[in-house]
Amino acid sequence: MTRERLTLFDTTLRDGAQTMGVDFSVEDKRQIALALDTLGLDYIEGGWPGANPTDTAFFAERPPLTRARFTAFGMTKRSGRSADNDPSLAAVINAPVDAVCLVGKSWDYQVDVALGIPRAENIENIALSIAAVKAKGREPLFDAEHFFDGYKANPDYALACIRAAHESGAAWIVLCDTNGGVMPEEAYRIVSEIKNTLPGAALGIHAHNDTEQAVAVSLAAVRAGVRQIQGTLNGLGERCGNANLCSLIPNLMLKEPFASAFETGVTPAQLARITSVSRLLDEILNRAPGRHAPYVGPSAFAHKGGLHSSAVLKDPATYEHVKPESVGNVRVIPVSDQSGRSNVLARLAEAGIAIDPKDDRVAKLLDAIKTREYQGYAYDGAEASFELLARRALEQVPQYFDVASYQVTVERKRGVTISEGRVEIDVAGEKLTNIGRGNGPVNALDAALRADLGKYSSFLADLRLVDFKVRILTSGTEAVTRVMVESADGKGRRWSTVGVSENIVDASFEALTDSIIYKLYRDGAKT
């Protein structure tokens, strides 16, 4: 059976850049574009040339894409100007790109209120702009803004807008759910009607996620006749985001009825890179990956309950809808106060710790885990601290250093708050006193601890703290605090450690020292 080709269009660098708190640099954009290219996407929308200095600089030096069509985004021409005499349109058309995606109104209400021009003039602007892109030798795409709202309000006008783009040479007509409010059933019905009315038009879908259904809407549109799907990595985008390509691509490739009916430009080997590409974006944004994200999240294939975990080990397919490795993820058997022996053995095996299942130390380790979790520790989210706990029980962790004392001070002077940490440590008989400053007490202690670790300092050159979470476990003046620290290094590794104490500084210091010891152990540092 011949499968139909689906085209994947990424708009992370443009739509994703509208996410609150996201501000890509030119280098960020270049890195993301190259990662998307290796993933096998068909189009990469780089942004809007001329709209801001970052996008202008990014388009000035085209990234060396090997497969994807580099695409610029812009608006149809303004009223009162010709297509040849609109500086904004010219900046987009003249950019060194393969394709140009122009957005235009397709909802009569928006034309009346937002543009304030005659409806017929809007249609003419669409037609002339698409024709100008084609005349320049770029592949034209038309993004029909507010299409579903417009079609429900005035189907004849919405159709007239996309027909004008189609007849002027648009290679793709992208139906945009700009407000993110369309239901999957609505999307299926409307796309089916458009497909019947304009059978020669190649249709795309651009869904926003305001009802948590952007992926479902996109899949419904594909079933109805859409053959281009637009979205962003990790679902980035303004408000609630866009259709998440990290969910869409695996669904299209691994789930029926899509897998047998369609093919994408992404190979199975490239699909196995999608988790790493997803986490690269999080790394660039300096944020922790979404733990519960489908397919790519750290917990997407995590099995916590003891009986459940035991069954997973015997028959993974019973509890996992796809193989974790098909999307580049891994199965995780966390350990917790719900754990059984099978959880502990599985986690030990993942950490490369060989032990006889009948060894008495397994039961002792399980008891220790349950006791510590009763005290407030949580090892299902702190894999590195669990591994250290296990290896210490097996006497496999060297004593790299001893902390004699530490202190931290916070001083506010002339409107500026300064934190300073002081740590006294013993490294292989050498007594060291380190001082570090930071933008808070934990940051200052981290800086002081790592300022000089003697012969181990070189191992820590690429170590950095990427996330820090505090949870108050009990109320009152003697509340127990749990601190989770996530660290990363230059090898692309990330790990989490935990500390618990009635004192937040003590809890933080415990998690920080575990992070450093884990790094030293994993890098093979010798005492």
Image: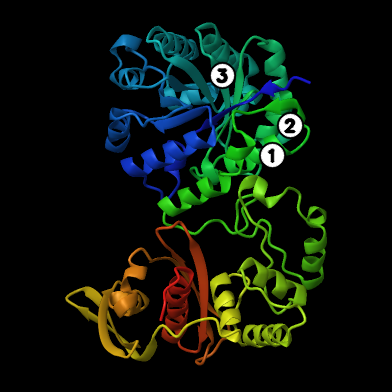
Quarter containing the C terminus: bottom left
Q: Name the mark on residue 308.
A: none
| Between discs 3 and 2, the one toward the N terminus | 3
At label 2, the amino acid type is: Phe
Relative to the observer, which residue lies in front, 158 or 452? 452
Q: CA distance from mark 3 to mark 1?
A: 23 Å
Relative to the observer, which residue lies in front, 22 or 150? 22
434 shown above or below 257: below
Judging by the rendered image, the residue that carries numbered circle 2 is 258
Front of the two marks 3 and 2: 2
**Residue 355 percent location from the top left of the image:** 69, 77
- Check whether the beta carbons of the residues at disc 1 and disc 2 lie within 8 A of each other: yes
Q: CA distance from mark 1 to mark 2?
A: 8 Å
Judging by the rendered image, the residue that carries numbered circle 1 is 251
SS label for mark 3: strand
**Residue 308 percent location from the top left of the image:** 80, 66
**Residue 216 percent location from the top left of the image:** 69, 38
Quarter containing the N terminus: top right
Q: Would residue 128 be found to the left or right of residue 361 on screen?
A: left
| Between discs 3 and 1, the one toward the N terminus | 3
- Local packing at callout 2 (Cα closer than 10 Å; few below 14, some 14-19, many 20+) is some
Judging by the rendered image, the residue that carries numbered circle 3 is 173
Q: Residue at x 33, y 12 (%)?
A: 80
Front of the two marks 3 and 1: 1
**Residue 485 percent location from the top left of the image:** 47, 71
| Between discs 1 and 2, the one toward the N terminus | 1
SS label for mark 2: helix
At label 1, the amino acid type is: Asn
> Is residue 431 in view from this perspective?
yes
- Local packing at callout 3 (Cα closer than 10 Å; few below 14, some 14-19, many 20+) is many
